[in-house]
Image: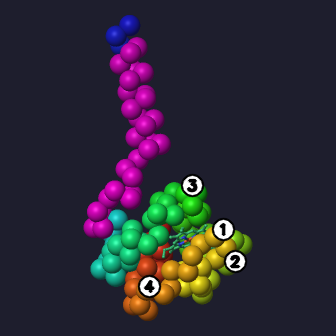
Amino acid sequence: MKQIAFIFGCLALAACVAACGPDPSKESDARLGLNTQEATGRQIYQQRCAVCHYAYSSRSLHGPGLVRLYRKKYLPSGLPANDRFVEQTIVNGRGMMPAEGPGLTPEQLSELIAYLHTL
Ligand code: HEC
């Protein structure tokens, strides 16, 4: 009986490790392999975007999850997933998303974009 409980315990643990994995949003910049520019972009993301978007999940918060943003062909709106349209969204806003451009310097915008490329 004890052995069966032990086996089930191991299986449950293994399943959780496989499914949950470490949560990237809690990992350090170094663990995620971010360079200085990307790490600065991550900080900007935390301050300006994280309230509405999950970075490491496709689940929606107020806006769509941004995981693998540039690795998919299209953005959630159906526009091609490239810098031009992502920048447009950030600077001018889109639908229910407010324009985030006014508070960002061109340098901060590039840092943010560099970080989004790592998702
Ligand atoms: C107040 C909430 C809010 C904030 C803050 C916010 N967004 Fe959004 N975002 C949204 C919503 C809502 C949408 C969906 C817009 C739509 O298509 O109607 C969206 C859409 C997007 C899209 C997809 C655009 C597309 O064409 O499908 C990207 C990329 C994006 N946001 C990036 C960002 C980034 C980067 C930041 C930080 C600078 C940010 N957002 C801040 C709410 C927000």
Q: Relative to residue 58, is residue 102 drawn left or right?
A: left
Q: Gap in Å between the C-alphas at discs 4 and 1?
A: 24 Å
As rendered, which of 87 and 13 lies closer to the eye? Answer: 87
Q: Residue at x 48, y 75 (%)?
A: 117
Q: Earlier in the sequence, mark 1 or mark 3?
A: 3
Q: Earlier in the sequence, mark 3 or mark 4?
A: 3
Q: Relative to residue 97, is residue 42 drawn left or right?
A: left
Residue 39 coordinates in the image, percent (x, y): 33, 75
Say whether marks 4 and 1 touch (CB < 8 Å): no
Q: Gap in Å between the C-alphas at discs 3 and 4?
A: 26 Å
Q: Gap in Å between the C-alphas at discs 2 and 1?
A: 7 Å
Q: Residue at x 40, y 85 (%)?
A: 108
Say whether marks 1 and 3 touch (CB < 8 Å): no
The three-letter amino acid code for the residue at tag 1 is Pro
> Residue 103: which disc?
4
Q: Which residue is mark 1?
A: 76
Q: Residue at x 35, y 72 (%)?
A: 43
Asked whether residue 90 is drawn in magenta, I would say: no
The three-letter amino acid code for the residue at tag 4 is Gly
Q: Residue at x 57, y 76 (%)?
A: 98
Q: Which residue is mark 3?
A: 59
Main secondary structure of the magenta stretch: helix
Respond yes or no on whether mark 1 lies under 8 Å from ligand 1. Answer: yes
As rendered, which of 105 and 115 lies closer to the eye? Answer: 105
The three-letter amino acid code for the residue at tag 2 is Leu
Q: Quadrant of the N terminus?
A: top left
Give the total of numbered labels.
Answer: 4
Say whether marks 4 and 2 touch (CB < 8 Å): no
Instruction: Choose top left, top right, bottom left or bottom right for residue 89.
Output: bottom right
Q: Is residue 86 visible?
A: no
